[in-house]
Image (cartoon, helix red, strand yellow):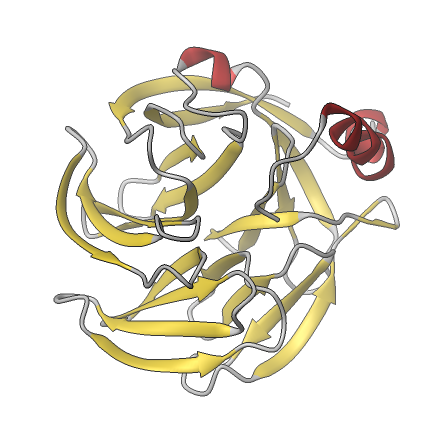
Amino acid sequence: MNITVTRLHVLVFLLVFCAPLFAQEKVPHYGYSIINTYPHSINSFTQGLVHHEGYIYEGTGKNGQSSLSKIRFEDGEVLMSKNLSRRYFGEGIEIVDDKIYQLTWQAHLVFVYDKETFELLDSHYNASQGWGLAYDGSSLILSDGSATLQFIDPETFTPVRKVEVKLAGSPVNQLNELEYIQGEIWANVWQTDYILRINPENGEVNSIVNLTGLSKQTQLGSSEAVLNGIAWDAVTERLFVTGKHWAHLFEIELVGP
């Protein structure tokens, strides 16, 4: 979800949806250390983040501000960018071979671009809302703000199967930006400082990454500047995270449990 909420709404959300994250002791909890800090556009309402061949690809949201960009993350220079029509609210992105997929929030459309030129190649219908997107080597993985993750055929964008994400037997809603890392699905939980590490076979949460305090290490550009954005460099095994309207991209290393 990508709307402004009141403090009361956030409190209710934390009590209803996030209490298990605080209370669960049997699931390992990881902290973090910051390895490097890189510039990130504070104007970017980050919805999707991918590391690919040495660059960061980013999809942003908000009607009239949604875009797809290729970024040299070391200095934040935007090397290529494409704006979406004002009627589309951009969401998660993923790269499959020579194509980039970009979700829209409520328009039920998925755009497919040429990776090298950002030329629009195709579009697909998505029956659910679009939030986050990842790729496990054969299927795209889609979050829609619920506790359900859908596995999608990249060619037809047809759902193949789905799993319900559970922590200690309880569904975890508000799953947002996704990344597939070494056999696990990593998911931001919207409006929290937590990333869940999920078993893709059964949806069980294997561990929790607690990034509390990271937002205090950067400048925040709005009241909606929450953690959202996970990128994995599989070649050098580097982990990057950022947030909506954050002024920095962080390379982090997990600590613990």
User: From the viewer's perspective, is 252 left or right of 200?
Assistant: left
Residue at image coords 74%, 55%: 165
| Nearest to the observer: residue 5 or residue 178 | 5
Q: Which residue is depicted at the point 39% across and 26% down?
A: 246
**In the rendered view, does 255 fall on the left or right side of 243?**
right
Determine whether 198 is above or below 220 in the image.
Answer: below
User: Looking at the picture, how far across and down is residue 27, in whole percent?
Assistant: 76, 35
Residue in the image at 44% along x and 41% along y: 230
Instruction: Farthest residue to the bottom: give it.
Output: 156
The residue shown at (43%, 25%) is: 253
- In front of the other: 8 or 23: 8
Can you see residue 252?
Answer: yes
- Residue 16 found in image quarter: top right
Where in the figure is residue 201, as x and y percent of width and height?
Answer: 67, 65
Q: Residue 247 versus residue 100: which sits nearer the camera?
A: 247
Pick the front one: 138 or 69: 69
Q: What is the quadrant of the C terminus in the image?
A: top right
Question: Residue 124 is drawn in which quadrant?
Answer: bottom left
Q: Tell me where residue 172 appears, x and y as whole percent.
A: 77, 47
Side of 212 relative to 71 (left or right): right
- Evaluate whether residue 26 shows in this view: no
